Image: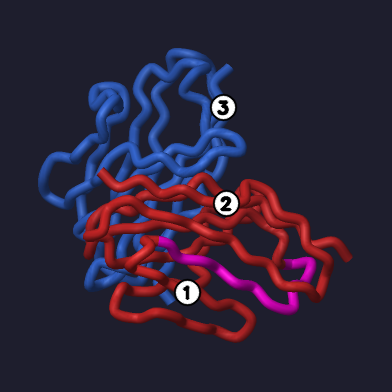
Amino acid sequence: GAVVSQHPSRVICKSGTSVKIECRSLDFQATTMFWYRQFPKQSLMLMATSNEGSKATYEQGVEKDKFLINHASLTLSTLTVTSAHPEDSSFYICSAPSDGGQPQHFGDGTRLSIL
Amino acid sequence: GENVEQHPSTLSVQEGDSAVIKCTYSDSASNYFPWYKQELGKGPQLIIDIRSNVGEKKDQRIAVTLNKTAKHFSLHITETQPEDSAVYFCAASFGNEKLTFGTGTRLTIIP
């Protein structure tokens, strides 16, 4: 079945550091990928839609200069949290839709902890 | 935009009994309804989905029902097992557009 790989699974770093998270579709191509943020015991909140070859589409309230998204190829999207602060600590998850659009397949998430 | 409500937020069920989780959606244009299972520290895994041209779908111990008129859909798990313990999310979307998730249900199976 369709597999989405996310790396790294966990990051612990100091405040002010920029952190890059990778999302790869391993056995299918994805012109679109989605980035979510999940706080403890809460639901998934869509942050942005990553579009291969064009700019990402950000949800209302998400700072595009804070969360940089690059969709460089049909199998790779990256999310960079720039100058991260403790309030950016969260579980970040990406997903990619199968050919034809649904269902979406999720990576295993990246737990980001900013000290 | 779409709004999805999910109930209950927590559910404890004796092993072997059935569990039912319900969701309602607001946008009548939504036509795709997946259910995801999320275990601790992992990403969501699709367990079953249904499209609006179907009223019910079953896969072994898991079934989903959809009532388009009332705009609600439900997840049914029969013969529950300890490994069914997890957080379950419903979601809705129109076509290939972004998913809107429910608030989640923490299901605990009591041995």
Which colour represents chain A? blue
Where residue B18 appears, as percent x and y from the top left, is 71, 72
Q: Residue at x 55, y 68 (%)?
A: B75
Depicted A88 relative to depicted B47: above or below = above
Q: Residue at x 25, y 45 (%)?
A: A49
**Residues behind callouts 1 and 2 on a single chain:** yes
Where the C terminus of chain B falls, by quadrant?
Answer: bottom right
Residue, disc 1: B65
Q: Residues within 10 Å of mark 2 (few under 14, many from 20)?
A: some
Q: What's the residue type where badge 1 is placed? A: Thr
Q: How many marks?
A: 3
**Colour setup of the view:** by chain
Q: Residue at x 55, y 38 (%)?
A: A42
Chain containing the residue with disc 2: B
Which colour represents chain B? red
Q: What's the residue type where badge 3 is placed? A: Ser
Question: Marks 3 and 1, how far apart in space?
Answer: 39 Å
Q: Nearer the viewer, residue A56 or B65?
A: B65
Q: Nearer the viewer, residue B3 or A115?
A: B3
Tell me the tag on residue A113. Answer: 3
Where residue A81 appears, as percent x and y from the top left, is 37, 27
Query: What is the secondary structure assignment of the residue under circle 3?
Result: strand
Q: What's the residue type where badge 2 is placed? A: His
Res B1 quadrant in image: top left
Where residue B3 appears, as percent x and y from the top left, is 36, 45
Q: Residue furthest right?
A: B111
Residue, disc 2: B7
Give the magenta part as a residue range: B72-83
